[in-house]
Image (cartoon, rainbow, N blue to C red):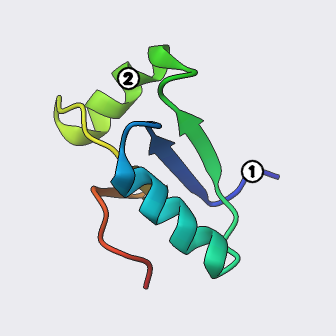
Amino acid sequence: MANAIVLYTHPDCSFSDALKDELDTVGTEYDEINLALRPEAWLDLEKLTGGERITPVMIEDGEVSVGFHGVG
């Protein structure tokens, strides 16, 4: 079964690292899409962000959150 959270990240993005660290700290599982390893996924990310190339982008239960805002 897939996780309820999908996380688009990029290794050059410190905000991606911060969000992953927070999710890991609270024990939340997520499916990570590393855009450096899967560059074709930029098209999907741009659809979620209105055309912007920004990370992290988190999708949780259908809700899209762009940028790092902390967990909880």
For residue 63, side relative to residue 48 (left or right): right
Which image quarter holds the C terminus?
bottom left
Residue 14, percent from left and from top: 37, 52
Considering every residue shown, the one lying at the far top of the view is 40
Pick whichever of labels 1 and 2 is earlier in the sequence: 1
x 46%, y 16%: residue: 39
Quadrant in which residue 55 is drawn: top left
Residue 20, percent from left and from top: 54, 60
* Amino acid of disc 2: Trp
Residue 10, percent from left and from top: 43, 36
Tell me how many marks there are: 2
Disc 1 + disc 2, Cβ < 8 Å: no
For residue 59, side relative to residue 55 (left or right): right
User: In front: 10, or 45?
Assistant: 10
x 27%, y 56%: residue: 67
- Report if residue 61 is visible in the image: no
Residue 42, percent from left and from top: 38, 23
x 55%, y 67%: residue: 21
Pointer 1 local density, CA inside 10 Å: few below 14, some 14–19, many at least 20 = few
Name the residue beneath numbered marker 1.
Answer: 2
Q: CA distance from mark 1 to mark 2?
A: 21 Å
Q: Nearer the viewer, mark 1 or mark 2?
A: 2
- Report if residue 44 is visible in the image: yes
Q: Is residue 23 above or below residue 49?
A: below
Q: In the drawing, what numbered circle is on residue 42?
A: 2
x 35%, y 33%: residue: 45
* Amino acid of disc 1: Ala
**Mark 2: which secondary structure?**
helix
